[in-house]
Image (tube, rainbow, N blue to C red):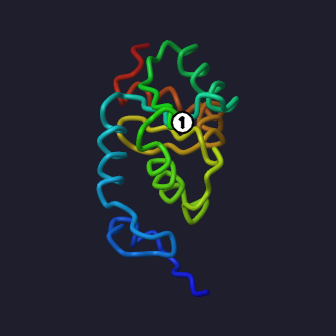
Amino acid sequence: MQYRTETRSSLSSYNKVNNMGMFPSDTLARVESMAAENAVVIFSVSTCCMCHAVKGLFRGMGVSPAVHELDLHPYGADIHRALLRLLGCSNGASTSPGGLPVVFIGGKMVGSMERVMASHINGSLVPLLKDAGALWL
């Protein structure tokens, strides 16, 4: 069995057929649109403890993120695969909640829980939130 590999430069052209079949090009556009709808957007799974923790972190800071629970979303599986590819943590074939939560601030992907917590600890999260208009301190 042959597998095709994808590079980060090929992420914008999902019209190619890979070993998983056809990946809809509109999925990336959907993710970009959803990520731009609010200053802070969290892609989550409703039963994930790490997702719950990151939502609590932002709400505890006074931020009201838009939360997309992918297990409850009609296109959740496709969006999850697209997010995994954007994170570069897999080929997008995973069906587990791995890689989640994924956080966007100001329409730009910050990353998963580890990146958000690292930004919070090193003090760079609050300036990101202020620049995006999510925090007025």
Label 1 environment density (alpha carbons within 10 Å; few <14, some 14–19, many ≥20)? some
**Residue 112 higher or lower than 82, as above or below:** above
Which quadrant, please, contains the N terminus?
bottom right
Q: Position of residue 93 (x, y in %)?
A: 58, 61
Quadrant hosting residue 50: top right
Q: Which residue position holds label 1?
A: 71
Q: Which of the 4 quarters of the picture holds residue 60? A: top right
Q: Name the one closer to the observer, 99 or 108.
A: 99
| Residue at x 50%, y 54% (from the top left corner) | 81
Is residue 8 shown left or right of residue 14? right
Q: Number of callouts in the render? A: 1
Q: In which quarter of the image is residue 24?
A: bottom left
Q: Check the image and name the residue furthest to the bottom.
A: 2
Residue at horizontal 39%, vertical 72%?
10
| Residue 27 left/right relative to 91 | left
Q: Residue at 29% of width from left, 55% of height from top?
A: 26
Q: Position of residue 123 (x, y in %)?
A: 59, 31
Q: What residue type is labelled 1?
A: Asp
Please name whichever residue, 62 or 101, is drawn nearer the observer in this view of the structure.
Answer: 101
The residue positioned 39% from the left and 64% from the top of the image is 23
Residue reaching furthest to the right: 49
Q: In the picture provided, is 26 more to the left or to the right than 40?
A: left
Q: Position of residue 134 (x, y in %)?
A: 39, 22
Pick the quarter of the image with the C terminus.
top left
Secondary structure state at the residue bearing disc 1: loop
- Judge by depth and name the residue closer to the eye, 115 or 33: 33
Q: Where is residue 86? Give x, y as percent.
A: 48, 57
